[in-house]
Amino acid sequence: IRLSYLSSGDTYYWNGSVFSSATVSELSATGRENWYYTDSAIENALLSGVYYKVESKSWDKSLNEEASWKSSTFLFDSGAVTFVVQKPQTADLYYSPSKPLAAIYGTAVSALSGVQKVNVKIEEVNTGGNLFWDGSYWVASSTWVVASGTSSWSYPSPAWTDDKIYYVYVNVLDLAGNLSTNTTVAFTYDGYKPESFILNPGMAYHKAGSISTISGTSRDVGTYMSGMLKTQIAIRQGG
């Protein structure tokens, strides 16, 4: 077999130790009908972003030689896969029916080989044991699903449950088999409506000067509540 790459018009061949353009190096494979060549040093010598050619030629026991070299070319890619989860965002901690999260989506880039797929895992926190979305149902075993698209990707949200904490995990696999590390985004789905209470005025009749300030309290409800944002009031004359 021969392993080589082309650079600036010169062909560099693997000689068992290094790539060299000094001579054409041919290496002997192990096996006959099924053959292989193993050399742990090759992996450290390959350069990311470079196209390599593997060539093979065989002989039979009668010393008949194959007519020509067979070849296969590949791009060696050890580069990092980068991606962004655009929604949900780490800075956006709460969603609800009034602030929906209809899909999980983002972008991904693998500069050399390209993106093969984007994996998504959705975890729902429960006191009786966390559940994972398998594409159709919530199940007890940790499960990944595949998003649609590559450079721009998305996954439709399951039906979120009120008063739950969710974790979304994302990683990306490129065409060379490089798998990124996971990115994790946590958020709370809070569909419970808050409550407000008027303290002043608190009686049916008030004298002048007793209601210069209108006051009360408001509270959010639920176990994993998002907390109060604001309270608005309206003052109307008449019944």
Image (spheres, rainbow, N blue to C red):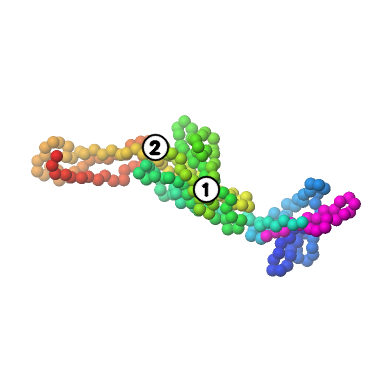
Q: In the figure, is residue 103 to the left or right of 206?
A: right
Indicate which disc, 2 or 1, sits on the residue closer to the N terminus: 1
Instruction: Single out the residue that lies furthest toward the right.
Output: 62
Q: In the figure, is residue 7 to the left or right of 169?
A: right
Placement of 20 over or under 175, stated as above or below:
below
Predominant SS of the magenta segment:
loop
Tell me where residue 42 appears, x and y as whole percent: 72, 55
**100 falls in the magenta region:** no
The kind of residue on which mark 2 rests is Asp
- Rate crowding at label 1 as few (under 14), some (14 to 19) or many (20 or more) other CA atoms within 10 Å: some
Identify the mark at residue 190; answer none if there is no mark.
Answer: none
Helix, strand or loop under label 1: loop
Rendered residue at 43%/39% (across/down)? 159
Q: Is residue 132 visible?
A: no
Rendered residue at 81%/47% (across/down)? 33
Q: Is residue 13 visible?
A: yes
> Is residue 132 or residue 224 the one in the foreground?
132
Tell me where residue 158 appears, x and y as whole percent: 46, 40
Q: In the rendered image, which residue does mark 1 sit on?
A: 148
**61 falls in the magenta region:** yes
Rendered residue at 64%/60% (across/down)? 49
The kind of residue on which mark 1 rests is Ser
The span shown in magenta is 51-69
Identify the mark at residue 162; answer none if there is no mark.
Answer: 2
Tell me where residue 140 appears, x and y as whole percent: 52, 33
Instruction: Single out the residue that lies furthest toward the bottom.
Output: 9
Rendered residue at 53%/42% (across/down)? 145
| In front: label 2 or label 1 | 1
- Rate crowding at label 2 as few (under 14), some (14 to 19) or many (20 or more) other CA atoms within 10 Å: some
| Quadrant (top left, top right, bottom left, bottom right) of the N terminus | bottom right
Instruction: Single out the residue that lies furthest toward the left.
Output: 208
